[in-house]
Image (cartoon, helix red, strand yellow):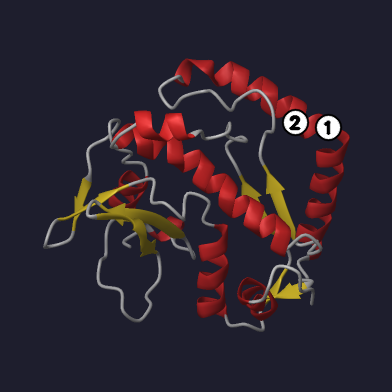
């Protein structure tokens, strides 16, 4: 991915081809074996937010491959990013803090809601649920790993739609209430201490094993 010099760092974005929305296409700011696409940062960013019915697909590369956002499985990219970090930095690299930021707890996804929505409408219903499914899996697998912190407002914003951009004030209010709760305040303070210390408490290799072991195992 081509960047201005002041933007260069290890960054990853995910999109999907229009032909297969369940297979993530990784856009990187660094080289890795097997990659061929080299989009600009604008192209990559536009591809990740090109949600059907809101934005047109983004064409990238000489073959003009078509990409859209909302790839199922990486709307919450934490799991994929941990795998990517292991590949780039090695399994012995220590992790000081993993912060996963959600967009609210989605309401229950009923069968009626799924069958009523087709195409883009169904995809928009699946995205928040997909995020929460990954978050739930990681919460179970990493429940005693202090380096993992999930933040997602649990009340008030579940039913706000993508096109309701005028409700930013409501989102800010619910977010402030969430952050001010005693549990989240303590979690944020502990996270800041770990970030300042910069010394990790768990290796990427240990985290990788966590995803291949049974849910009931502990390291």
Tell whether 190 sits left or right of 136: right
Q: What's the mark number on residue 22?
A: none
Q: Residues within 10 Å of mark 2 (few under 14, many from 20)?
A: some
> Which label is found at residue 178?
2
Q: Dot 1: few (<14), some (14–19), or many (≥20) neighbours within 10 Å? A: few
Q: Residue 83, percent across and down? A: 54, 71
In the image, is 193 to the left or to the right of 45? Answer: right
* Location of residue 92 with respect to 8 vertically, above or below: below
The residue furthest left is: 63
Pointer 1: what residue? 181
Residue at 31%, 41% (x, y): give it: 50
> Which residue shows up at 30% across the image and 35% down it?
120
Q: Residue at x 65, y 76 (%)?
A: 204
Residue 116 % position (x, y): 36, 28
Secondary structure under tag 1 reads loop
Residue closer to the observer: 117 or 46: 117
Left or right of 82 on screen, residue 63: left
Estimate the spatial distance between the alpha carbons at disc 2 and disc 1, rounded to whole Å: 6 Å
Towards the viewer: 196 or 119: 119
Indicate the position of residue 117 as horizontal and vertical percent values: 35, 31
């Amino acid at each position: 991915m081509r960047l201005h010099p002041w933007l260069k760092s290890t960054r990853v974005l995910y999109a999907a081809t229009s032909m297969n929305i369940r297979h993530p296409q990784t856009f990187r700011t660094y080289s890795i074996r097997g990659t061929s696409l080299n989009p600009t940062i604008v192209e990559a960013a536009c591809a990740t937010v090109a949600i059907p019915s809101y934005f047109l697909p983004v064409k990238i590369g000489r073959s003009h491959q078509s990409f859209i956002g909302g790839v199922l499985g990486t709307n919450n990219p934490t799991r994929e990013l941990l795998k990517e970090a292991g590949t780039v930095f090695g399994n012995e690299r220590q992790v000081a803090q993993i912060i996963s930021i959600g967009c609210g707890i989605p309401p229950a996804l009923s069968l009626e809601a799924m069958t009523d929505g087709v195409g883009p409408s169904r995809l928009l219903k699946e995205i928040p649920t997909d995020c929460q499914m990954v978050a739930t899996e990681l919460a179970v697998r990493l429940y005693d790993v202090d380096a993992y912190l999930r933040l997602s407002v649990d009340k008030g914003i579940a039913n706000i739609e993508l096109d309701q951009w005028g409700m930013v004030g409501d989102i800010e209010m619910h977010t402030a209430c969430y952050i001010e709760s005693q549990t989240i305040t303590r979690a944020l303070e502990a996270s800041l201490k770990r970030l300042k210390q910069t010394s990790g408490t768990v290796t990427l290799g240990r985290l990788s094993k966590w995803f291949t072991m049974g849910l009931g195992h502990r390291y």
